[in-house]
Amino acid sequence: QYLLKLREVLPVVATLIAAITFQAGFTLPGGLNQNSGEAILAKNAAFLGFLLADAFAMWCSVLVLFCLLWSMFCDSEKSVPLIDRSMWILMASLYGSLVAFIWGVFAVIHHESLWAIIIIIVLCSLLGLAAIEGEIFYLILNQLPATSTEYRLCKLLNTLWVSSKSKPINLSNSHENYFPLVISKYS
């Protein structure tokens, strides 16, 4: 049931990634030579890394679209694995576009500002690691202040729920503790 609902969202994300990577392939880092029309950085190793990572990301996102299309015409036994694999292929596509971004920025500004490259590589690597391991992502999100009314309401409900259960819950340990009433409703 969950994977079939996921099939409605994944094509939108895959199409956006395909469009972004397609555009990045034609809006090349460093630009084009006005006389010959060739990429200025064509012989740069970082530029070639950008092209490979961008092509990989586009290939993966288009493969996700094909898998999702095939899943619509298969019976549920065959469509569920296709949808499940599509999620992993889409993650590979996101990582490919992240690597392409790093290579593209490196190819363009590595001569000018090495410290900016180091910061970009570290931040993008942390983002990639946080996305791989969901717990790291939730630990980071739990450190950010929340200002939404929905969060305040859920925190109030959590306080009431804790006081009725008479055992305290440490809000900093788990993202589920913020919304115990909501999570127990959908569990």
Image (cartoon, grey):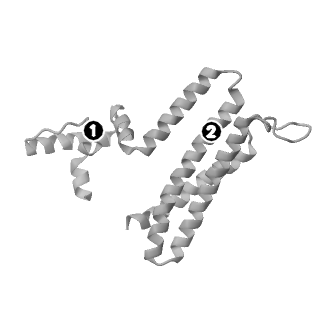
124 horizontally vs 1: left or right: right
The residue nearer to you, when weighing 64 against 147, is 64
Q: Is residue 73 left or right of residue 30?
A: left
Residue 111 shown left or right of residue 157 in the figure: right
At which x and y percent is residue 148?
34, 38
Give residue 114's position: percent from left, percent from top: 63, 22
Q: What type is the residue that disc 1 sits on?
A: Arg
- Marker disc for residue 101: 2
Residues at marks 1 and 2, CA–CA distance in whole angstroms: 37 Å
| SS assignment at label 1 | helix
At 91% from the left and 40% from the top, the residue drawn is 36
Residue at (69, 27) in percent of width and height:
109
Mark 1 surroundings within 10 Å by alpha-carbon count, few (fewer than 14), some (14 through 19), many (20 or more): few
The disc, 1 or 2, on the residue closer to the chain's N-terminal end is 2
State whether residue 73 is above or below residue 176: below
In the picture, the quarter occupied by the N terminus is bottom left
Left/right placement of residue 161 relative to residue 93 reads left
How many marks are shown on the rendered structure? 2
Q: Which mark is residue 56?
A: none
Q: Residue 147 appears in which quarter of the rendering?
A: top left
State the image coordinates of residue 33 (x, y, percent, origin top left): 86, 36
Residue 43, horizontal then vertical, whole percent: 79, 37
For label 1, the residue is 152
Give the residue drawn at x 51%, y 35%: 125
Residue drawn where x is 53% and y is 35% of the image:
124
Residue type (three-letter) at the residue carrying disc 2: Phe
**Image quadrant in which you'd find residue 84:** bottom left
Quadrant position of residue 100: top right
Q: Which quadrant, please, contains the C terminus? A: bottom left
Q: Check disc 2 and report its element: helix, strand or loop.
A: helix
Badge nearest the viewer, 1 or 2: 2
Give whichever of 109, 4 is nearer the camera: 109
